[in-house]
Image (spheres, coloured by chain):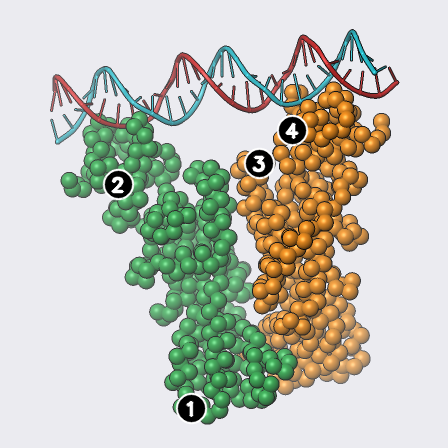
Chain colours: A green, B orange, C cyan, D red
Amino acid sequence: MEMDERKKKILQAIIQDYITSAEPVGSRTIARKYNLGVSAATIRNEMFDLEMLGFLEQPHTSAGRVPSARGYRFYVDCLLQPTEISNEEKKIVQGWFQDKMSDVDQIFQSTAKVLSRITHNVTLVMASRQMTSKLKYIRFLPLDDHRAIMIVVTDTGQIENCIYSKPVSATLDDLNLIAEKLTHYLSGIPMSDISMQMIDKLHESIVDDVELYRVAFRSLTKSFHKQQLYKGGTMELLNKPEFKDVDKAKNLFTLLEEQDMVANLLMSDEGAHNKKVSVRIGDEANLSSINDCSIIEATFSDDNVVLGKIAVLGPTRMEYAKIIGLLDFMKQHLQYILEHYHDNQ
Amino acid sequence: MEMDERKKKILQAIIQDYITSAEPVGSRTIARKYNLGVSAATIRNEMFDLEMLGFLEQPHTSAGRVPSARGYRFYVDCLLQPTEISNEEKKIVQGWFQDKMSDVDQIFQSTAKVLSRITHNVTLVMASRQMTSKLKYIRFLPLDDHRAIMIVVTDTGQIENCIYSKPVSATLDDLNLIAEKLTHYLSGIPMSDISMQMIDKLHESIVDDVELYRVAFRSLTKSFHKQQLYKGGTMELLNKPEFKDVDKAKNLFTLLEEQDMVANLLMSDEGAHNKKVSVRIGDEANLSSINDCSIIEATFSDDNVVLGKIAVLGPTRMEYAKIIGLLDFMKQHLQYILEHYHDNQ
DNA sequence: TTTAGCACTCGTTTTAATTGAGTGCTAATA
DNA sequence: TATTAGCACTCAATTAAAACGAGTGCTAAA
């Protein structure tokens, strides 16, 4: 059995209807609302076929059909056409950002908020600090005998500090000599590219105690490795009929409270880099507690350097077309903002 | 009509029963479970009186009685005896903190988590940075022509940085001279005591541009003014029968997502400072969206300097005795930890 | 191949009946 | 006078039965 044009049209109609109604949709509804030029009986027959193909499911004998995960997958891959975000919405988004630019943190916070407002779903924004900037310089400040403060400044105005454990013998001047050298070698390099391996390259140029460098490197990578996570619209879930059973919602809430879990979830999308916007449906995310959910995500970057991710998480019944379009726009807008962030300061 | 001994006993029994059962409690139940030496009929009469006094309410004619806000208030003020936290629980709490001390942030995070685990309610921890430490030194680092980075280090190892807008004419050396002077005058002073007014005191000793100092002060107070807020156990709410109606929960969730709202709520407790642990019941918190909730809170401090607050928020039906005892212990434990934080580093 | 028609299914809604926890009142009792 | 046993009454909650209706699958005719 093949997917002919008519089957596609019917599947599309069913999915679109179900996305807005959240109710199993029957042949009659399709025949009436979407005039496909065939009768309900014909549609009924086609629906039977679509069920055989695994695209539809029936909650019980005398109910309408509901799209299966596979059905959504087919819809996303072959049927759907991303909706261009409307000019009006564009303006809303842009307006939202206009006056909330006081720091990078707030940009991401706003991103999460505005996305959840528009999509009525949970929004996740993940930004790894290491990715968003290039090293400007490193400096040490005193703390006590065996520790110093290491300050790392990037070109985007991000300032990180961390405690640096040092041998008592090392003076602050010693450390700042190291800082100077490191700054010399590393300035202008994206934080994401700074890894422990680089120390080997530098090895020959270093005459003094390598261990001190090693510790500095470790602090450097560690402090910028932090994944910052922003959430929005968590309680939008409670408006969804699929979560009117509180226990189902509880699972998801519990998951969302675990930063690590969420971070892993976002990191685990293998197909993400190839596409503009990636969609994982149902168990494709490989996480049992969100089996009935989908994640739509986009990666934002600068010159091929991945800066972070924006994602929308909700029940599989989701406005894929709209959200995909929105994320695509948002990703570009975010990239634009981050790129021009320095100028606008 | 007066509250005699028997009425008190009956009220206490009803409240305790309701706290665990969440069901309206009837005269029969009281007579059977708590042997007060009188019959159900007598209790019935007393309950009628208690209702007249405003301590009890009846959901409908043929239901048992439920404590009113006023009933809880009387219970908290006159009847309840704070439960000493058990040794076992003490150990759990202490164990929890043992290995999670890597920074102040994590201490508060853990506090929120462990409290919510024990109380099965929402826990809020508010710590104002300004309050938790004394100034150690100030230093400036370069950023660009019209801005510098101001680094503030406190004795507890907290490091704050902020952007300092400077006249182009001011060199980094100029600024660091200022930093030195400020450090000289302010080191050892609790961050909470540093206010814009102090600049007047310093006025006479300052010969150079006062405006530069003023800006530094402003940055200083601003960056340490941030109220950090930690939450725990949000979704414990969903387990409470009073929130099985999702819409009620939604209100509260929405509130909890608004940092400012929550901060204000915690700040608005006027009676808090007088008591060890303060309780606000129902509308005593003056916030309509939590009319059916109570807040139990304790202030933790060091040498009379307020450091922050820990609070438990939940439905008015709450284990007051236990939570009050717990918060009292936790507050002391937290004070202890913060006091010894520096040594253990 | 399409479709009208019809019997059948099964969750949902409606209605009615039953149950039972709890009360208030009264009259007897200590 | 305070207490209590007893009883009629109330009313939400539970259970049972009935009616409904959206939707299907199948068949036979177009």
Give the distance between the C-alpha atoms of the residues marked 4 and 1, in whole angstroms: 79 Å
Q: Which residue is tagged 1?
A: A205
Q: Is residue A234 visible?
A: yes
Horizontal and vertical percent for residue B12?
74, 34
* Above or below B305: residue B255: above
| Three-letter amino acid code at the position of disc 3 | Pro
Q: Position of residue B275 (x, y in %)?
A: 78, 51
Disc 3 crowd rating (10 Å Cα; few below 14, some 14-19, many 20+) is: few
State the SS at label 2: loop
Q: CA distance from mark 3 to mark 4?
A: 13 Å
Q: Nearer the viewer, residue B218 or A229?
A: A229
Circles 3, 2 touching at the beta carbon (< 8 Å) = no
Label 3: which residue?
Answer: B241
- Quadrant of the image occupied by residue B183: bottom right
Chain of the residue that carries numbered disc 3 in the rendered image = B
Q: Which residue is mark 4?
A: B24
